[in-house]
Image (tube, rainbow, N blue to C red):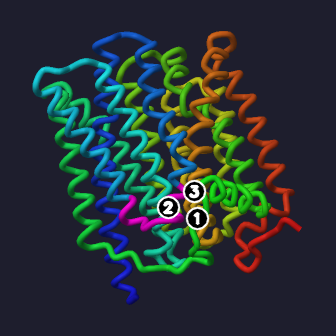
Amino acid sequence: MKENDWKKQIILFLLGQNISLFGSSLVQYAIAWHITMTTLSGSMMSLSVICSFIPAFIISPFAGLWADRYNKKVLIILSDSMIAITTLILAIAYSKGYQHIFLLFIAQSIRSLGAGIQTPTVRSLIPSLVPPKYLLEVNGYSGSVQSVVNVASPVLSGALLAFSPLYYIFYIDVITAIIGIFLLIIFVKVPYQKKDNEKKSSLIRDIKDGIAYIASHNYIKVLFVSIGFYYILIAPIAFLSLLQVSRSFGNDVWRLGTLEVSFSIGMIFGGLSVALFGKKIKPPRLILFSMGIVGFSTFLLAIIPNFYLYIAIIFITGIAIPHIHTPITTILQKRVSLEFRGRVFSVENMISSSLMPLSMVLFGPLADIISIESILIVSAICMGLLIIFMMFNKHFHAIDSPGKKNFSN
């Protein structure tokens, strides 16, 4: 494939996926805020979170297997179509006056299933469209675009919700999904890649083979264990920073909005930085250095008395995080064998999507017993210990060695 051909392919593919993601993000925020404003119930909000999270977690192992077995392009189209059709039915029901809140929970569950299939499939498809030497750059730019979506979605969703019925936002999501599917069908051609083993075995056997593949590659095991603890340790920043700002600096809406926007803008700059300069540093060093920045920032957030300095540290944290996530994604895209790539990404997706919310079962109640600042200091210390473990682990430093795929011996 000519250089301009693959660039056109990946630009159109990511354009379509991010347009669809933008519509989905609008609906996600709109539903969450609608439930909050109409019920004022913590139980209903918890049920909403469960409906948005659990189905994707449950479907992930099967989604990874399907991504390895079947045509990834078709799988993305089907999952995006399932989300769009569900949202369309919900929009029609709400426009006709059937506005029961449990319809939102049902829709959230089905949309979560679709997202649980789509996410690992998209990530495992990208290496089929991009030459290996450009993967880090493409992932960096993609991350920046997603961060832009994260900045714009809540702002536009809130504005639409204030001046229009909820079901108008549902229709927008249907339109953006159609655009994404159209671009994928018409302009993106996925090259056929012969797998090492074309024979189909049982579902359970294939899942076991995926687990065995991860278990036999120590660099994957060390990477997954490390990022698992990392996701737990950054949960206090991700979930408790809003509460900390409210307690320490005031619960003004502009403060909370500034916090969210500063972090997202930092993520945008971080993604661009990885794309432009990430190749100049070896992945293990880049990951360790960036984790060090996040750990030190966590400590500073516990002791800084000034709101504007606090926002500056949040901004820096936002810049650092893509320098951790993007190299990890790129490593897995490059190193994992084609026939196992979907299953490996499904496990990574389960780790990233589950550990942070689940850790709040501990951190949430704990924040009502001890100060958030104490939680942040302990998290920073543990992050330092994690960095030391990774620094002296030979398997972690072998993650960027393309000639050695198995370090189990």
What kind of residue is marked 3?
Phe
Which quadrant would the C terminus be assigned to in this image?
bottom right
Q: CA distance from mark 2 to mark 1?
A: 8 Å
- Tell me if residue 179 comes above or below residue 383 in the rendering: below
- Kindly indicate whether the residue at mark 3 contacts the one at mark 2 (C-beta within 8 angstroms): yes
What kind of residue is marked 1?
Arg
Q: Is residue 254 magenta?
A: no
Q: Secondary structure at mark 2?
A: helix
Residue located at (72% from left, 62% from top) = 213
Task: Tell me the magenta residue range.
Answer: 64-75
Picture quarter containing residue 89? top left
- Kindly indicate whether the residue at mark 1 contacts the one at mark 3 (C-beta within 8 angstroms): yes
Q: Earlier in the sequence, mark 2 or mark 3?
A: 2
Give the residue number, with chain letter if any, for mark 2.
67
Structural crowding at the residue carrying mark 3, measured as other residues with C-alpha within 10 Å and reported as few (<14), some (14–19) or many (≥20): many
Give the residue number, with chain letter if any, for mark 3.
345
Residue located at (41% from left, 26% from top) = 256
